[in-house]
Amino acid sequence: MAIPVDPPHDERELPRAPSEAEWADLSEADRDRVVAALPPSLPAWANPPEGDRHRNEKERTGDTLRRFFRKSGRRMYVSSELATYYPAEPPFSPDVLVVRDVEDRERSSWVVSKEGKGLDLVVELHDQGDGAKDLVRNVQRFARLGIAEYFVVDLATARLHGFRLPARGRAYDRLVPQAGAFASQVLGLDLRLEGRRLRFFLGTAAVADADDLIARLERAVDDAVESREAEAEARRAAEVRAEVEAHGRQAEAEARQAEAEARQAEAEARARAEREIERLREELRKRGG
């Protein structure tokens, strides 16, 4: 049976943001209407899914950076698969994007003319599909758009690629890893692959990701359970000791009572014997008299 194939699509079909000149001629109200009309997501053919591994790594990478910068207090905006509109350019949705020195708030899209600046860093995770998109066309395109740094994680081959724009340059320099790590000037962090897992480092300290936090939580739960079990065991031991001590005190009291009763019985027996002897003596005196 023949499998139907969708007809090829062209980026020219996608809606575009106005050019810089067109944007400058618009009123504020018209600009708001234009931004509201731009789709917040791209069609599947323009941003095809690549399976669970791609989605999981993308979400983990974005969450790790977002959590780190919020904790550090740096004004960094991090998002995933956000429709991004440069003036008069076909839109695209990076797997992970970072913009420095802007408000960290929820957005439906990134419109460069409205935000007043473009992206500072993009991370693409490639697993299936067209590898030339990430390692050839995007390298040329992102450099032309002025995106300062671009990293590609090839999940299929477990390789990390890094690119950076030189000062006043419009073509990327390929980064050379140092001791297996790529330094990001935008993030202020080092990037390294551990297997197929992208990790971030601040100096020698790894930035905690969701897996690390889950492992910490599990250890904390295990420790709490062990602590509660130890406390319960200690309480049971204390209860046993208290019960033994109570039985011991009871046995001791019973022994003292038995001893007192024995002494009393002995004294009563002696008294009866003495009375009997005295009676016999008296009887003998009477007979002898």
Image (tube, grey):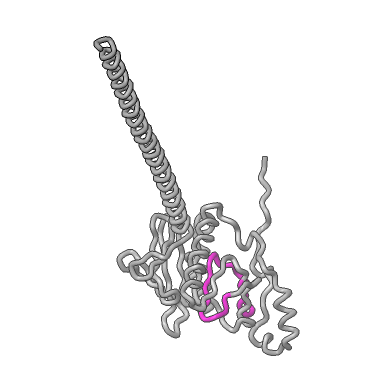
- Image quadrant holding the N terminus, namely top right
Looking at the image, is 21 positioned above or below residue 122? below
Q: Nearer the viewer, residue 270 or 175?
A: 270
Q: Is residue 117 above or below residue 220?
A: below
Determine the image quadrant of residue 9.
bottom right
Q: Residue at x 75, y 85 (%)?
A: 29
Identity of the residue drawn at 67% across and 75% down: 16
Judging depth in this view, the residue of 234 and 83 nearest the camera is 234
Q: Give the percent coordinates (x, y) of residue 217.
A: 46, 55
| Magenta region, main secondary structure | loop
Residue 80 visible, this angle: yes
- The picture places residue 32, in percent across and down from the top left corner, at 72, 81
Q: Going by the image, does 248 lie left or right of 39?
A: left
- Could you tell me if residue 174 is visible in this image? no
Q: Give left or right: position of 143 versus 243.
A: right
**Relative image position of residue 158 (x, y in whole percent):** 41, 56
Q: Quadrant of residue 116?
A: bottom right
From what the image shows, is residue 151 above or below residue 53?
below
Q: Is 79 left or right of 154, judged from the image as shown?
A: right
User: Residue at the left extreme?
Assistant: 288
Q: Is residue 103 magenta?
A: yes
Magenta part of the chain: 84-104
The extreme top residue here reads: 287
The C terminus lies in quadrant: top left
At horizontal 37% and vertical 40% (from top left) the residue drawn is 241
